[in-house]
Amino acid sequence: MRFVIQRVSHASVTVEGEVLGKIGKGFMVLCGIAETDTREIADKMVKKLCAMRIFEDENGKTNLALSEVGGSLLLISQFTLYADTRHGNRPGFTLAGKPDMAEPMYEYIIQEAKKYVPEVQRGRFGADMKVELLNDGPFTIILDSQELLG
């Protein structure tokens, strides 16, 4: 599982002209799900994500978590985070979770995140989404379950 976490001042996701999710201060997270991912992996990733302390405190140090700043989450499914670019110029996606497995996992991630963060917005799995954001910093973190779990 891979999360690309961007600290944002605001972010939104639109599908076919309809805004599906919109947040102010918080994290816009691209969620990549591998075929080998499990709920146990998702639990650890979501817990780590929601506890990430990358907002500035009164001394200007990145020391505050989402809950401490009243931040929100915007979770976007993104299978292309598992692009295999080792051969040729056209990426392969065989490492990405198949939709029948990845979509329920994405839904599970959203439900788990709601246990930690009051406002969780979302995109639409498998849709052509237009994502807009104002990256605050810029501040971008990549959280990979392979590194997190060893």
Image: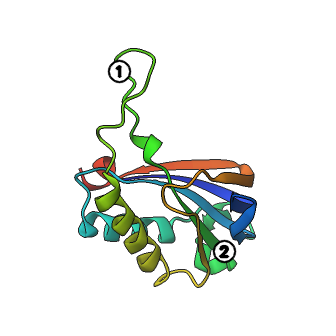
**Left or right: residue 72 compared with residue 41:** right
Numbered circles on residues, count: 2
Residue 10 sits above or below residue 96 on the image? below
Judge the density around disc 1: few (<14), some (14-19), many (≥20) Cα neighbours within 10 Å. few
Res. 57 visible in picture: no
**Left or right: residue 118 compared with residue 97:** right
Element marked by disc 1: loop
Q: In the image, which disc is placed on residue 50?
A: none
Which sits in the foreground, 54 or 76?
A: 76
Residue that sits furthest to the top in the current view: 88
Q: Quadrant of residue 38?
A: bottom left
Q: Quadrant of residue 57?
A: bottom right
Mark 2 and mark 1 lie on one chain; the one further toward the N terminus is 2
Q: Which residue is found at the position 55% from the left and 55% from the top?
A: 127
Residue 136: x percent and y percent? 74, 54
Residue 30: x percent and y percent? 53, 54
Instruction: Give the residue type at disc 1.
Output: Arg
Of badges 2 and 1, nearer the viewer stands 1
Q: In the image, which disc is placed on residue 71?
A: 2
Q: Quadrant of residue 15?
A: bottom right
Which sits in the foreground, 28 or 141?
A: 28
Instruction: Give the residue type at disc 2.
Output: Gly
Q: Which residue is found at the position 46% from the left and 84% from the top?
A: 115
Judge the density around disc 2: few (<14), some (14-19), many (≥20) Cα neighbours within 10 Å. many
Residue 8: x percent and y percent? 71, 59
Q: Which residue is found at the position 36% from the left and 53% from the top?
A: 33
Element marked by disc 2: loop
Residue 31 sits above or below residue 81 on the image? below
Question: Which residue is disc 1 drawn over?
Answer: 86
Residue 115 sits above or below residue 80 on the image? below
Q: Which residue is found at the position 71% from the left and 62% from the top?
A: 12
